[in-house]
Amino acid sequence: DAKTTQPTSMDCAEGRAANLPCNHSTISGNEYVYWYRQIHSQGPQYIIHGLKNNETNEMASLIITEDRKSSTLILPHATLRDTAVYYCIVRVAYTGTASKLTFGTGTRLQVTL
Amino acid sequence: GAVVSQHPSRVICKSGTSVKIECRSLDFQATTMFWYRQFPKQSLMLMATSNEGSKATYEQGVEKDKFLINHASLTLSTLTVASAHPEDSSFYICSARDPLGSGANVLTFGAGSRLTVL
């Protein structure tokens, strides 16, 4: 699996957009970018994933650069409840049986008033 | 959406006792579940892959005689920490994939079980 690099921590003011970067310069052509987050003392939560096109859902947007070597997760209007550790994971999307996910250290996002 | 339930959410036990943690997929069937462990201020570490009807696959360095995994049905996997010791105190989290969900690597996680061994 391709290695990812994320900043250790970031701050964001409530109501502003939170832009979380992820570098994955060794990504392969068949690897997707997945984002999960973990709020303190809870299990991780899936946010979004993409291959090469930008993606948007009710939680966030995912912007992937044209060369696919980096991506940005955007929370358009961060709230205090978005304070969490955000994990960027690069993985081949197997069809059929589930594949294990390996978590790095992630980015600790602190949303403040 | 897919829901994974873990029980108990918290458990405190004496050193030397065994503790069982249950992981259930509530609205879908999971042939594969994953067990993770997380120490304070650290990331999640995959312990093992639980396979329905067959033996679990353990990650390197995880003692299979210490962390017993049983996946007897398509909706239930259990992790038993045998003869727990204080160093086994941790946050244990299970996950599973809804086969009808939106992607092969989209896992649903339980809320976790915090084990404290005195």
Image: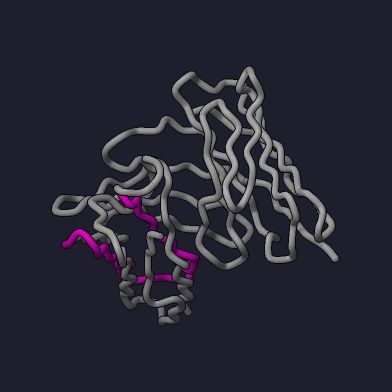
Would residue B91 appear left or right of B100 to someone viewing this image?
right
Question: Of B59 and A106, which appears nearest the observer?
Answer: A106
Locate residue B25, reporting x and y percent: 31, 63
Q: Is residue B95 visible?
A: yes
Question: Of B9 and B101, which appears nearest the observer?
Answer: B101
Locate residue B22, reporting x and y percent: 31, 70
| B77 in magenta | yes
How many circles with numbers are drawn on the protein? 0
Locate residue B15, reporting x and y percent: 40, 77
- The residue depicted at 71 percent of the width and 42 percent of the height is A20
Which of the 4 quarters of the picture holds residue A5? top right
Image height check: is B115 above or below B73?
below
Q: How is the image coloured?
A: one colour
| A5 in magenta | no
Would residue A28 appear left or right of A70 to someone viewing this image?
left
Magenta residues, as a range?
A: B72-99
Would residue A15 appear left or right of B76 to someone viewing this image?
right
Locate residue B62, reporting x and y percent: 36, 50
- The residue depicted at 40 percent of the width and 41 percent of the height is B103
Q: Is residue B79 visible?
A: no
Would residue B81 appear left or right of B117 to someone viewing this image?
left
- The residue depicted at 29 percent of the width and 48 percent of the height is B99
- The residue depicted at 26 percent of the width and 59 percent of the height is B69
Task: Please state, as top left, top right, bottom left or bottom right, where the C terminus of chain A lies in the image.
Answer: bottom right
Which of the 4 quarters of the picture holds residue A4? top right
